[in-house]
Amino acid sequence: MPRLRVRFYAELNDFLTPKRRQVAFDLSCAAGATIKDVIASCNVPHTEVDLILVNGRSVNFDYTPQDGDQVSVYPVFESFDITPALHLRPAPLRETRFVLDVHLGKLAGLLRLLGFDTLYRNDYDDAELARLSREERRILLTRDRGVLKRSRVTHGYYVREDTPRRQAIEVVRRFDLRRQIKPYTRCMRCNGLLHPVAKADVLDRLQPLTRLYYDEFHQCAACGQVYWQGSHFEPLRRFVYAISHSADTETPDTLTPNTSTP
């Protein structure tokens, strides 16, 4: 059985047992196993890995480890190029789109608020998430490590943070998305695109005080939801400003749009 010296870097350590984090450790593997098998045995999803160096040389997932190999494993470099090293996944997705698992419904709303094309339903199973990610070239965001181990998933990320606001900050930072933010362009409920609509065209859907005090409205082209800058808009505006500029400012974890009742 080949015996290896392995080191994982940066956020890949999140998947390791405490004794293996931030240090090189010895690991034995079965004869004929690939380096991808070795990484999986450490509970690290392949979608989180973009560079493997063995004895200082870049290798792909099919490499068969040899006794005494020194293995260094690095995370996905989504926001910059690592040429001429060997990328282990397809090229980074420059048209950033997402699909989210059942645990990330509130994050889906915040990503839509920021203008990102984000699919979410609370009944997507793992197979459907993997299919959508691959066929529609979407980054799969999940709190389930298991789904990232599916071979069909080429672009995926395990969300570390627990609260929706911090999750949104994490995703924007991880994929270097600040310059791609286009707030208030998507429906937070269904992901459809918003467009300006005349007040007269939605008047029958507005409450009396809304009719009196507001004149500018947007409507979702997909589901018909109506939006306006009402009393809940200020927390949304602060959130967008914070994440667009510093991504550090404290903002509410619960954010809801001003909408009329569909």
Image (cartoon, rainbow, N blue to C red):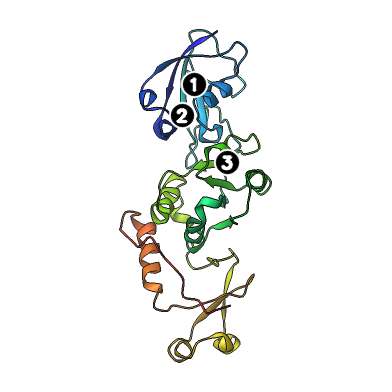
For the residues marked 3 and 1, what is the alpha-carbon distance in whole angstroms?
Answer: 20 Å
Residue tagged 2: 74
Task: Write down the residue under mark 1.
Answer: 53
| Location of mark 3 (residue) | 155
Disc on the earlier residue, 3 or 1: 1
Q: Secondary structure at mark 2?
A: strand
Q: Is residue 107 left or right of residue 198?
A: left
Asked if residue 250 lies left or right of residue 216, the reply is: left
Q: Residue at x 42, y 55 (%)?
A: 164
Q: Is residue 228 above or below residue 7?
A: below
Q: CA distance from mark 1 to mark 2?
A: 8 Å
Closer to the observer: label 3 or label 1? 3
**Local crowd at mark 3 within 10 Å, few (<14), some, or many (≥20)?**
many
- Residue at disc 3, secondary structure: loop
- Amino acid type, residue under disc 1 in the picture: Leu
Mark 2 / mark 3, whichever is N-terminal: 2
Asked if disc 3 and disc 1 are in contact, CB closer than 8 Å, the reply is no
User: Horizontal and vertical percent for residue 45?
Assistant: 53, 33
